[in-house]
Image (cartoon, coloured by chain):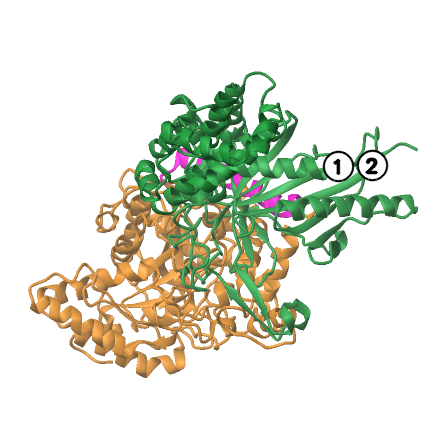
Chain colours: A orange, B green
Amino acid sequence: MTTGAAGAWAGASAIATEVRSGGRSAASVVEEHLAAIAVLDGELHAFLTVLADQARADAAAVDAAVAAGEDPGPLAGVPVALKDNLCTRGVPTTCSSRILEHWRPPYDATVVGRLRAAGAVVVGKTNLDEFAMGSSTENSAFGPTRNPYDLARVPGGSSGGSAVAVAAGLAALALGSDTGGSIRQPASFCGVVGMKPTYGTVSRYGLVAFASSLDQIGPFARSVADAALLHDVVAGHDPMDSTSLDRPAPATAAAAAGEGVEGLRIGLLAEFVEDVDPSVAGAVRAGAEALAAAGASVEEVSVPQLHFGLPAYYLIAPAEASSNLARYDGVRYGLRVDAPDVEAMNRATREAGFGPEVKRRIMLGTYALSAGYYDAYYGQAQKVRTLIIAAFDDAYRRFDALIGATAPSTAFPIGAKVDDPLQMYLSDVCTIPSNLAGHPAMSVPFGADAGGLPIGVQVLAPALGEATMLRVAGALEVAAPALAAPALAAPGAGATR
Amino acid sequence: MTEWEAVIGLEVHCELRTATKLFCGCRNAFGDEPNTNVCPVCLGLPGSLPVLNAAAVEYAMRIGTALLCEIRPSVFHRKNYFYPDMPKDYQISQYDEPINVDGWLELPDGFRVRVVRAHLEEDTGKTSHMGGGGRIHDAAHALVDYNRAGVPLVEIVSAPDIRSAAQARAYAAELRAILVATGASDGRMEEGSMRVDANVSVRRVGDPGFGTRCEVKNLNSLRSLGRAIEYEIERQIALLEAGDTVLQQTRHWDEGKGQTVALRSKEEAFDYRYFPEPDLVPLAPDAAWQQRVAAALGPMPAERRRRIGTLFGDGAAEGARADQIATVTEQGLDGLVLAATDAGVDPGLALARTANEAAADAERARELSPDAYVALLKMEQAGALSSTQTKAVLAELLAEGGEPADIAKRKGFEALESDSLAGVVAEVVAACPDEWSRYAGGEDKLAQFFIGQVMKATQGKANGKAVVEELRRLRG
């Protein structure tokens, strides 16, 4: 372990401050991170594409701006990793699928443009479960990502690559997407902060769709403040996304900077404590006590309707996915497997291009939308969704925020659940309800289990309640037990954790 | 045994004349180089999202208003099926909550056809099968042009109120005139900007229920529409009279063979798996917007025909004249007729010139200055120009523009002064004593002979009416 500068382990705010003031060059920051990727990513496999040349050029541009007396922006020189379902102009965007293996989008996602405008340096594209369908990053056509705390375990998913990049110091920040917990669950497994904002606060333009009514882009960071900083950069109305909220996104960084929780009413969600591993339940209860000690009023609350979230989700998400993924037919882009006629070509392409979990969900969703079954499945699931929103609304009449487990367990061994889809689906039981409701939720590291694997506590808030959520998250961060650095991480990790 | 009766409903797809496509900023234009008006959105690239074009909504509301529909809050759905010229392999359309519902359309003879709905949706691209003589099954490969993908359409669905091929043609013609009048469409069936599918079934007169229907596609003109429906009615009647049953099918009209051919049966029909489009929000035009649209809408063809008809008094606008009125209205030239009659031109003359000559070049006639047109017709009415000369001046006026008097002068169409005309007539009469004695004896038809002779003598500069007047004067 090296001493001296925090190196690849420095936080985003610290890097940006130093680069903007001319105290450090963006080039040196990028080189440290590229070096860490070169050393560590062979084993971790967080990245599908490393953009070394482009990152160096972007860093040089940031340094030139600073030298010219300009302000490159709030993320000046900060290395950021992007989940590989975010479109990057001219750079492969695979969604970890054979069907898009060689596809290079002709355009940047809105969030990518906003990152660059803020001075961020994109270092690479990260691994995910194919089309974001999974909870372990094992469903990648290009091999799994490994958890830096234990290489035999999964990092969670589907944004496992982004979580690992940040946890191991390969990037200061990362963006992921969260459809049913795909940011929060891997954040929990990897000991980092992961946040799913309110649906509509971050543009989905350029996020390859899995389930359009649930997908939302959000940040990974090693601190609550850094997560808020990244969120503030990418959030805000986008005329290219009709579901983007047409109002200025409230800045949240200040709220995260330690306003405290005095006077806040916080509900401890019984459903998210009772059916989880004892170590996780213990961490959540300890978090609740810490919040009470910090001046919040904390009370246990039961919202039994949340039990219906998982089955409703596994109808709605596959239904939308079956339609969203229809376009991968071999006609216009991506993989094409030739056949005598167009229907056969469609079939052969999709048979060869999609992995088993994607096929499973397409079939499930196709069935759920079929004539004669729509009302019983998709229609009924949408009613459950309304029920869950009403149940949350009821809880938020009494509470400013809710807390519970992010995931029922800590990171599980690679291969443990690949043959049991239902067990895998249960990994998201605590995160799914917030997607169905469109509400913000985030995971904050709060200690470790007996084996040293990180545990995340989830904070949930009503729509557009990010500021309150970040206050609670900040208080948990302050009170959290020290978490050891990952076994495999960039130099300097031990010095600052 | 009672007579058979046809039951027909039409589905009309109308491309809207917006500058840009329904969900992106690409140009909406016919005939451009393939795949030049495309972007990530209309190509359905991964990650792209639709944004609704307000101008398309406005046109849809104009159509709904013109068809006396109720305009309602609506929702877009996805209609899922695989087709290579559909970039997302689903079409964004409106399903159970369309923007326009429950209107009607009145045919020129007063018959009303109910309009069930008129909803917004996106068009597909266009596939060209290459090699094998253009037939799908023999083609070596196919090329797809996505310029049309995402072009806004309004689909207008009639109730099954139509009872004959002639009535179906009248409905389609009237609907086309309405669509053109709203400004929403150019109504060009041959370019595919208006496409008609016909649902046809037959039953015994008096039967309350419906027979099994067939949907006939590929009707590219009013003529095809009429022929295809007539064929389909005969085919179904023949089946039923032979004791067979009509199968519910989608059928393709083969213009060359003059037949409908089965495309797919009910069992092979797609399950479209409609569900609400999660990438768009519900559409709810407010009352103020609806009122602005209604206020800006000009009079519809029925009202415009009525205005012209009143120029001729009760019952006078029938037969050939009714056809002329229909023509000028459909071509958007009724304003010229009214401008002329307001300025004192005889309604018969104004209608005839507009329906026969101006309508032959309707596109240019719509651009014509009404003042110039009125001035020309007044010259004809005053006898300053013969009808032949008037037509020649009008042709140049349409082609080049300018002032009718100048054009007439340039062409040497200055009518003969009445003195010199009288001289020419006298010479001709003197040269043809036999014909003159017969004319003088009451054979009026010989006036044509003398007009011809006078025209020959004056190189066509004489006015026929003036010649007849002079002949009558001489006869006494």
Report whether A427 appears left or right of B372.
Answer: right
Residue B5, percent from left and from top: 80, 35
- Letter of the chain that mark 1 sits on in the rendering: B
- Picture layout, residue B245 above or below residue A445: above
Q: Circle 1 sits in a helix, a strand or a loop, which is it?
A: strand
Can see residue A301? no
Whether residue A382 appears in magenta in the rendering, the answer is yes
User: Is A200 a magenta residue?
Assistant: no
The x and y percentages for residue B398 are 39, 43
- The stretch in magenta equals A374-400
Q: Residue at x 48, y 32 (%)?
A: B464
Rendered location of residue A166, percent (x, y): 32, 68
Quarter of the figure with the C terminus of chain A: bottom left
Residue tagged 1: B7
Chain letter behind tag 2: B
Disc 1 to disc 2, C-alpha distance: 8 Å
- Which of B375/A318 is in front? B375
Q: Residues within 10 Å of mark 1 (few under 14, many from 20)?
A: many
The three-letter amino acid code for the residue at tag 2 is Arg
Q: Above or below — where is B39 with respect to B195?
A: below
The amino acid pointed to by label 1 is Val
Q: Position of residue A72 (x, y in %)?
A: 16, 62
Is residue B275 or residue B137 the one in the foreground?
A: B137
Above-or-below relation of A367 to B467: below
- Disc 2: which residue: B203
